[in-house]
Amino acid sequence: MFKVLSLAGNHVKDDVWHALIVVISNASELQGYSVRSLYTALQAYSEQGSLLRVAVWCIGEYGEMLVNNVGMLEAEGPITVTESDAVDAVELGLNRYSADVTTRSMCLVALLKLSSRFPSMSERIKQIVAQNKENMVLELQQRSIEFGSIIQRHQSIRSSLLERMPVLDEATYLVKRASATQATIPAYKPAAVTPGGLKLPNGVAKPAAAPLVDLLDLSSDDAPVTSAASATTAPSDFLQDLLGIGGTNLSTAGAPSSASTDILMDLLSMGSSPSQNGLPAPAQEKKPVSAAPQVGSLVPEPMDLLGSLSSSASISGTKSTIAAPQAVDLLDGLSPRLEDTRPSITAFQSATLKITFDIRKQPGKPQEATIHATFTNLTSSNYTDFIFQAAVPKFIQLRLDPASGNIVPANGKGSVTQGFSVTNNQHGQKPLAMRIRMSYKVNGEDRLEQGQVSNFPPGV
């Protein structure tokens, strides 16, 4: 497989090198051999994309095996690789002009892991990572800033944070891949053949009439058009069919054809004609528009944005009720949704610090919650360089927003706030749980507090 990646790595599908990484992670006795073989191949075939991705992943995970020749096989010859050589190989992949975003992201992760495996190279790795802080690709820019902060400011947790990846479960990986593939394949629906021999993918055969309308129709394809209705369609109806605005303005069989009164009204109409609503057309003869419309003939609504155009519409001579415009339906998605606000909870309190959580949930999304944390200083000294960290189980996704500041005023005379959102992928089965950690300085002295939040309201 290494030979295939070396000679045709640019033509190997993603599934292949993904599966190779799974195999290497499960074969602990071959990990040393794999990282050395990939490193050697990378020196000669660095232009092969798939080879580069697998190699930098293995160097990041098993870099110390590469340098110390761990797990040597009998037929394998020893090679001399220094810590600097390993970093050089990853840097080469990061700066390669043909590397895509995925490859560069994997190189940044590998460099971050090597900063823990090779402490003597941390300063150089920090400089390499910092080169992407102004990258135009947002993903690379964000990774560079976050990884630089971990290398520089979080040395105490870096070793535990950057441990080797756990052994990947190949069976679980294959099941997930199969599920994802089935989800992306649409259900097969046999194509229908029209009288002219044209196959339509949705299984509905349309007549040969109005080919331009069928070609550009933006409305539903599942409503067949009768030949009688097509023959009586007015020019204004043709514009509606052409642009797919609203329902199709078709008269019932035997009813008089609709007159082309105002093309602009038909084009921009937010309402619908009586024939669109399924109501029979008035049997009496239509009269010309009077200067002052009769009371009750039109029912304008306050939110009718195009109400000023209503004066040009034809009005029946009798007091027949005309359906009110449905402008509210168009703007229904813009109306604000009420948030489900839960009671505030005291997430953490000690003799020096108090933390409260304000919890909000959006209707229709029970698994998601937005939390607003407030940090209050209970002592007489200011807290500087305040940092809040949170950890959640694997079935929960957490996204922290930037804090409002890093100085918590003394004696509760002010506070620092920070928002974050959580998504419980097993909502209703497992409750929300969280471990929190706060680090800050008091008169230049480092302080650290931590705790567990387990008093979230039910249903969060």
Image (spheres, rainbow, N blue to C red):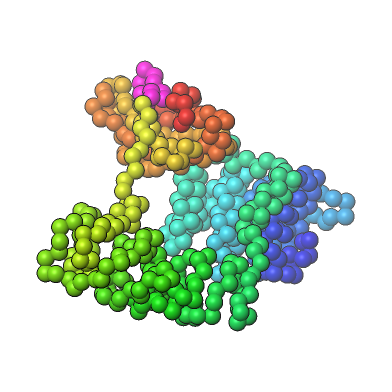
Check if residue 361 falls in the magenta segment: no
Residue 79 in which image quadrant: bottom right
Q: How many numbered marks, from 0 up?
A: 0
Of residues 245 and 35, the one drawn nearer to the viewer in this rendering = 245
Left or right relative to 162: residue 232: left
Q: Position of residue 433 (x, y in %)?
A: 51, 29
Furthest residue toward left: 292
Left or right relative to 17: residue 349: left
Specify start and end residues of the magenta stretch as a single range: 345-357
The secondary structure making up most of the magenta span is strand
Left or right relative to 180: residue 7: right
13 up-or-down from 453: above or below: below
Furthest residue toward front: 284
Residue 254 in which image quadrant: bottom left
Q: Residue at x 46, y 45 (%)?
A: 149
Q: Position of residue 91 (x, y in %)?
A: 58, 60
Of residues 457 and 43, the one drawn nearer to the viewer in this rendering = 457
Q: Quadrant of the N terminus?
A: bottom right
438 up-or-down from 78: above or below: above
Q: Residue at x 48, y 56 (%)?
A: 139
Q: Position of residue 420 (x, y in %)?
A: 41, 39
Check if residue 346 falls in the magenta segment: yes
Q: Is residue 406 visible?
A: no
Q: Is residue 34 visible?
A: yes
Of residues 222 and 261, the one drawn nearer to the viewer in this rendering = 261
Q: Residue at x 54, y 31 (%)?
A: 428
Furthest residue toward right: 74
402 up-or-down from 273: above or below: above
